[in-house]
Image (cartoon, grey):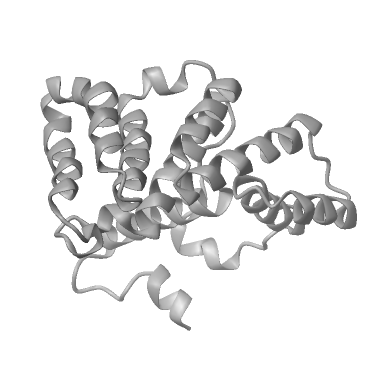
Amino acid sequence: MDVDPRHYDHIAINDGDVQNIVLSYLVHNCYKETAESFTASTGLKQQTDCLVGMEKRKRIYDFAVEGNALKAIELTEEVAHGLLEKNEGLHFDLLSLHFVELVCSRKCTEALEFAQVKLAPFGKLHKYVEKLEDSMALLAYEEPEKSPMFHLLSMDYRQRVAENLNREILAHANLPSYTAMERLIKQATVVRQSLSQELGKDGPSPFSLRDFLKS
């Protein structure tokens, strides 16, 4: 029988559940050595293929963040054949990373040629037109980092693309694409919304994850 959300505070947290949450975070983010040490110290079992896959995902993630998108694409094809063909949006974002890297390196002619061959076909689809225009607009600026599209050059943007790629690779391998903690936070959000609807605006304030993290 389901537990009333109002009684969640009285439920004991199993140490094994906490350990699995921590391990999930380490595996998802490719902290291989830490994950191995953690499993050894806790006695948790970790599948060998997950550890091997972790090394490959880490390399792919690092290549994407560093701007070496073509290498990330190449390794992704080895690890998850056909993934990018099925996920055009992610493929476009990775190709755009390489284009941006060429522009930042002042290799404008090479960037233009690359765009004509690899990016232009995406222009046939309306949903990519605006993104394509933003990327191409970088060629008009001597200092792309000062252009209105400067966010395309940022580390945050590369990390978002790399994280999306990481999630898709995990999903392709039939592994959770989100960490256990992320799934738990989502569930807590659903519970909070449920309590808000039940108690109404005039009732006592329900559990707030934001307030909890601030405390």
Of 18 and 124, which appears nearest the observer? 124
Q: Is residue 54 above or below residue 189?
A: above
Q: Quadrant of the N terminus?
A: top right
Residue at the (48%, 43%) spot, across then down: 64
Q: Is residue 128 left or right of residue 2?
A: left
Residue 143 place in picture, x, y as percent:
22, 61
Residue 202 place in picture, x, y as percent:
19, 74
Residue 113 place in picture, x, y as percent:
26, 29
Q: Is residue 118 left or right of residue 25?
A: left
Residue 123 place in picture, x, y as percent:
15, 25
Residue at the (81%, 56%) spot, across then down: 38
Q: Is residue 82 above or below residue 134?
A: above
Residue at the (19%, 69%) spot, across then down: 201
Q: Is residue 113 above or below residue 200?
A: above
Q: Is residue 172 left or right of residue 188?
A: right
Total count of labels: 0
Quadrant position of residue 176: top right
Residue 1 appearing in the image? no
Toward the bottom, the furthest residue is: 215
Residue at the (74%, 48%) spot, across then down: 32
Residue 114 appearing in the image? yes
Quadrant position of residue 135: top left
